[in-house]
Every structure is written in C-alpha cells, then in structure tokens.
Amino acid sequence: MGIKERHERDREAVRRAILDAARDLFIAEGFRQVSIRKIAERIEYSPAAIYGYFASKDDIFFALAEEGFRLLGDPGSDEGTRWLADRAPLDRLRAIFRRLYEFSEEHPQYFALMFLERSVPRISREYERFAFAREMKRHLIEEVERCVATGALPEGTRPHVAIRIVTAAVLGIAAMRLSDRLAPAEDAKTLACDAIEVALAGLKTGVRLQSTGNWDCPPVTPADLETS
C-alpha cells in the first residue's frame, strides 16, 4: 500500500469514527446536546481536528442522514428492484412501504434522524437535496402510475397524494413505536401492515381526495450524486 492510499484509508477511518461518535451521542443525548467538543472527546481528537473533516455539526448529521438513505436502499437501482420484479403492481407498492417500516426497526437511530428529527437545521432546510430521497419519490410515483395503468388503482389517483397518505400511515406507526406510545401487547409491525392495507384500500375505492399534492422533486444533478 502506497503513502497516498494509506493516507486515504486513515482519513476514512477517522471520518467513520466521527460519524459513529456523533450517532451514538445523538441517540444518548439528542441533537441539541451534541457538540463538536463532545464528539472530539469521544474519539480522543481535538475539536480543531474534527473541522478538518466536517465544517460544522450540521454537516456531520447531514452525512449521517445520507448514510441512512443508503441503508434504506435505492428502490430504483438494480439491486433495489430485483426483489420486486415478479410482484404485481400493488404488491410492489406494499413491499416498498413495508420495507420503510422494517427500516425503522432495523435502524431506529437513522430513521429518527431522517424522518422525525426537527432540530437539525440543514436536514430540514435541504431535505430535497438528498439524491436518494428524490429517487425514492420518483420510483414511488412510477409504482403508483403502474398501479393506475393496470387497474389496481382507479384512474385519477394522484400519485403524489397517494404516496403521502401511505407514507404518513407508516411513519405514524413507526413514530408511535419509537416513542413508546403503543400498548405492550400491540405488535407494531402488524399494525404498520394493517395501516398500509387500510390506506391502499381507501385509495382503491376512488374516494375523492382534496389534496392536490403539488410538490415536485428537483432534478438530480451530477454534483448531487457525487455528494450522496
């Protein structure tokens, strides 16, 4: 291994340590209580050294959220669509939303940061800059359109609104579980699956929806892909 490769490996190891420390502190104390100084103490580095990797605490947590989206997976990729290939259109939609709930159980700290945390300014301000988030929305829109085209959902179903409705159902159950708002005997995963079914059943009836769903995904640029 050459000097350059060793240097890059060492930098990546320190960057990984910074992110792991920030994630652990986030879980234990919450975003507002985490500081660059605490992260530095956790990995036995100086605060000045941390700034050699990240310009601010916000940037550290933005990088963690990007990691979370990678863990959730890009459903538009070859790997992400392979497990959906043989399913009927509505079953594909069910599977994607069930995967979202399962992610909240497998990686609760990332899920909370990506979907529930409101105190990280950069995540709130620049959410649409996550290439994975935008690609996920695009893929879901395509799946809903496929359901409409095959008759699984009625004509006139607004994909953006449909996605919001089912996503809200899944996020709601996940948030209730993470905040211990469910009864001890309740099975959160089963409840999430039921919520998905009820939301889809409502959409299948062709119920008149008042929401317009006028939100757009800005195009993914090469610069976004380089940083995601």
Image (spheres, helix red, strand yellow):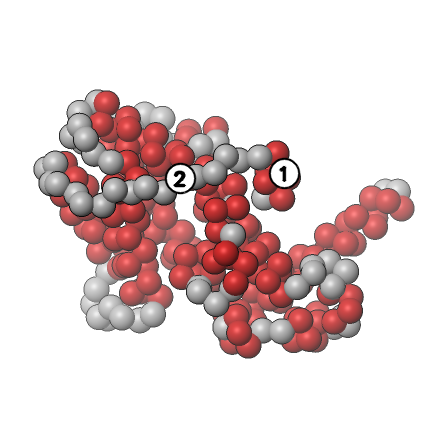
Label 1 sits on residue:
223
Q: Secondary structure at mark 1?
A: helix
Depth check: 204 or 181 in front? 204
Which amino acid type is marked by label 1?
Ala
- Residue at image position (11%, 40%) is 207
Residue 134 seen from this side: yes
The first of marks 2 and 1 along the sequence is 2
- Residue at image position (78%, 54%) is 10
- Residue at image position (18%, 45%) is 210
The answer to whether residue 58 is left or right of residue 48 is: left
Label 2 sits on residue:
216
Residue 85, x across and y down, in percent: 36, 26
Quadrant containing the N terminus is top right
Say which quarter of the image contains residue 146.
Answer: top left
Alpha-carbon neighbours of circle 1 within 10 Å: few (<14), some, or many (≥20)? few
Q: Secondary structure at mark 2?
A: loop
Which amino acid type is marked by label 2?
Asp
Residue 145, x across and y down, in percent: 28, 28
- Residue at image position (36%, 42%) is 215
Instruction: Judge whether 194 appears above or below 225 on screen.
Output: below
Quadrant containing the C terminus is top right
Instruction: Judge whether 77 appears above or below 53 on screen.
Output: above
